Structure formats: structure tokens, C-alpha cells
Amino acid sequence: MAPLPTGALNRLADAIAIATISYDDRDAVDREAFSAFHDLLEQSFPRLHQNLLREVVAEHSLLYCWPGSDPDLEPILFMSHIDVVPIEAGTEEDWAHPPFGGVLAEGHVWGRGTIDTKSTLMAVMEAIESLLEAGMNPRRSVYLAFGHDEEVGGAQGGAAIVALLRRRGVRFEYVLDEGGAVVSGQMFGIAPSVAAVGTAEKGMVNVELSTHGDQGHASMPRPDNATSRLCRAVTKVEASPYPLRMTATMASLLAQLADHMPWPRRMLLKNLWLFEHWVVRELARDPVMAAAMHTTQATTMLEGSSKANTLASRARAVVNVRLLEGDDSAGVMARIKRTIDDPEVEIRLMDELGRSEPVPPSSIEAPAFDALRETVAELFPDAVIIPHTVAGATDSRQFAPLCDNIYRFAPMRLQADDLCRIHGTDERLSFENYRTMVAFFRALVTRGVG
Ligand SMILES: [Zn+2]
């Protein structure tokens, strides 16, 4: 593997040191930080900025195009996002190195955004900068799209980029975004690692349940107590989980793994037609796998009276629903209504908090996936590539109208304890990981552009 380009670690550290934080309250966003980040990119990658077309979209998002010589080839798109999540109040002191210090220490780059996901943004730019230096002239065009509000839903950046590209009639051969990584395969009881590529993505809706009753003194309770009624409704929803089911994505994941499994697991996985029920039950012991096999419903917010001795005139709860492929928000609403079966409970889809339908699976038989498979084999020779369903939402879901092959994968190795660092304390990325990432993007771009 080639060494990192000179200065690459410092450039990543500088990118981490700019606090491009997204907040639900958009007025709290530090706009200057985003402008400073744009400037940093221009200074860091001079060749790229000379050779690629750059557009600022929705004020803070960026879209680049490296024009290819053959207009008949559909371009490829690499996505990332500029914004990061805030540091949870009260945890600033827990960090070994300041979250926006841009510190290089103990073989790692430390700080918010090192995993999620300024590293992919910087690595793909490093790759293109070095390919330009080597004199590459792509036949196929390459686009880069970096949203600025992914962590709060992407309603501005990602959405505006998609609208712009739709107007221009651009379609992509494939899209690569975050949403997968190389992880240890221990959870499957196998020795090798797995390179988990998100080929499908769950949808998300929030459903508000609310009840009304007469306010009054709690010493004389009434049968139509709003809070009691709400609790009965919530209990019914919680008691009616969606049944687990084998999706096409999960079946394909297991098929990829089967050959690497010891007997008798291999036999079970190769005969899903017979053992599906058993396999689903076994997999569901792991909450991550369970979430990939049904639409989940989690009650998150609860609100009743604000006084201990007063009956609530209104009570409300919010159920956060993550939709699996095959389900949709209309179906979720109908099912919750049926489950609660009480006309006195108001049920409302909270569109103001965003809504996304599940993104159907992209094929792992497509030629586009072969490029990914070959590049994974080259840089992560010990890893078995598998498709999976991403439980969270990524900006790439908005690109579904522009592309049939959407893959979610960051070419980094994550250890078990890295998972709590994402959006948590002591987020960091090893130098070795970064070196692999730049090499991966170099190889993937080279393979793709012909
Ligand atoms: Zn992210």
C-alpha cells in the first residue's frame, strides 16, 4: 500500500479542528466555521480546485465535478458530510484530547468527525489530488457531494444538491456514502472480518399519540383521565412489535457468509428454505440483527400533567418508528390505529420532524458492486464483503431518484469500542486506517473512471 501523501494527517487534523457543528436549532449554527472549512479545502487541495468544477449549494454544502472525456458513461458520486454532531454537555472534560483540537497522538487523529465522517471527505479529496498529480484524465466523470446538515436530516444541503442534479438530468452509475465499515466477524462466530456495505436503508417516522380529558383535581379522578388513556395506548403499541422476517438483504448477507462458516452453521445457512425460522430466531438475539429483520417502534417522549395533583387536560407520547423494506408510513399509521383501537386517541404523523420511507436494496450483482468488491479484496484481503440494511438515515437516501446503485461503506476498520465513540466521547481514527482509506479511494476511483 502506498504511504500517505505528505501532510495528509495534518490536513485531516486541520479539518477536525474546525467546529462545523449541526444543531436542531439552525440559528445556532456557526456559519463562519463552514466558510472556514470551504477555505481549508481550497488551500489543502490546490490541484483538485484547479481541475474540478466546484459549486456551493444551499450556502454551506459543496458539489464538485471532475469532468470525464466520455459523456456516454454515467458518472460516479462520492458522498460525505461537512457537519458533525455537538459534544454532549458535561462530557467535554472526558475527552483524552480536545474534540476540536485536531490532535495527532498515540497513532490516532483525535476529535469529532474523525470517524463520522470528515475522514471520508478528506480521504477522497487526497485520492483525487494525488491522481491529478499522477496525470490522470478520467473517461468517466466523478462527482463529490458534501452536505452541511446531514446530522439534522439533510433537508437543506442534500435535498438542494439532489434538486440541482435532477434539473440537469444527471444520473449516476453508482453512489458511495457512509453507512458501513469493516468490522470483526466475531458476531457471526467466524474468524474473518466482514466488510459490511449498506445496500438498503430503513425509513423513519415519528408518530404522536395524544389524548384529551377534563382538567381537575387528582383527588377526584375521572374515568376519562387523559394520562391513563394514553398509557393504555402506549402499552398496546409496545405489546405489538412487528414480527421478525427474513428480508432479501438479510438472505443475501447470509448467503455471502455461508461459505466461510464452519459446519453445521454453513449447512443451516445454505438451506434457509428449511431452517429460516431457526436462523431468524438465533440472529434476533443480537439487537443489531433484530433491527434488520423488522420495523421497530420505540416510545421516546412522554408528557402528562405538569403538576402532581392535577389531572392532565392533554397527554402525549411520541413513538419513533424505523421502517424496514416492504413497510411504509401509511401502513405504519394504519397498524398503530388498529392496535390502539380507541377513537379517543389522536394519532398524527409528525412530518415536521422529517419522514423517510425505506430505500429498497441496491443489487450486489451490478457491475458497480464488482468495483467495490475488487477494491475491498485489495485493501482488506481478510474481509468477506456482505450487504446489510442501514438502520439510521444517510443523505444518500435522497439520491434514490438519481441512481439505482447506492452503496454505503466507509473503508475503515472499526473495533467494538469504536462504535461508542461515534457521536460519543474520544472519537478517533488510527493513522493506519487513514492510510488505507486514501489508498482505497485511489484504487476505487482508478477502477471506476476507466
Ligand atoms: Zn455521518
Image (spheres, grey):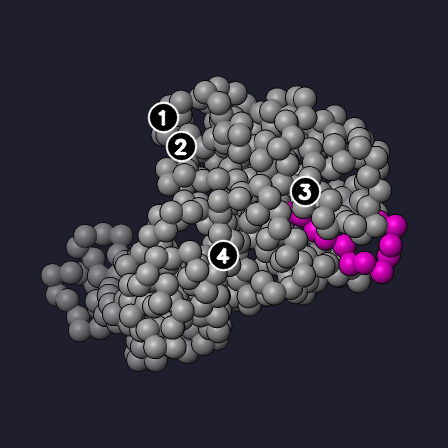
User: Tag 2 or tag 1, which sits nearer the N-term?
Assistant: 1
Q: Nearer the viewer, residue 98 or 52?
A: 52
| Left or right, 48 with reference to 222 | right
- In the rendered structure, the answer to whether residue 422 lies left or right of residue 354 reads left
Where is 21 relative to 274, above or below? above
* SS category of the residue bearing label 4: strand
Position in image of residue 364 (x %, y %): 58, 63
Please state which of the two labelled residues, at mark 1 or mark 4, is closer to the viewer: 4
Residue range highlighted in magenta: 68-79
Left or right of 249 in this view: 396: right
Residue at image position (82%, 39%) is 136
- Residue 287 position within the rendered picture, expressed as x and y whole percent measured from the top left: 32, 56
CA gap between label 3 and label 2 equals 32 Å
Q: Amino acid at mark 2?
A: Thr
Q: Are marks 3 and 2 in contact (CB under 8 Å)?
A: no
Secondary-structure class at tag 2? loop
Kindly state the secondary structure of the residue where label 1 is placed.
Answer: helix
Disc marking residue 443: 3
Residue extending farthest front: 263
Label 4 CB-ligand 1 distance < 8 A? no
Which mark sits nearer the N-terminus, 3 or 4?
4
Q: Residue at x 63, y 35 (%)?
A: 438
> Which mark is on residue 103?
none
Dot 4 or dot 2, earlier in sequence: 4
Magenta part, dominant SS: loop
Q: Disc 1 versus disc 2: distance between alpha carbons?
A: 7 Å
Earlier along the polypeptide chain: callout 3 or callout 2?
Answer: 2
Q: Residues within 10 Å of mark 3 (few under 14, many from 20)?
A: many
Residue indicated by mark 4: 386
Question: x%, y% of residue 447?
Answer: 72, 48
Q: Considering only vertical position in the picture, is 129 above or below 79?
A: above
Q: What is the three-letter code of the residue carrying label 1?
A: Asp
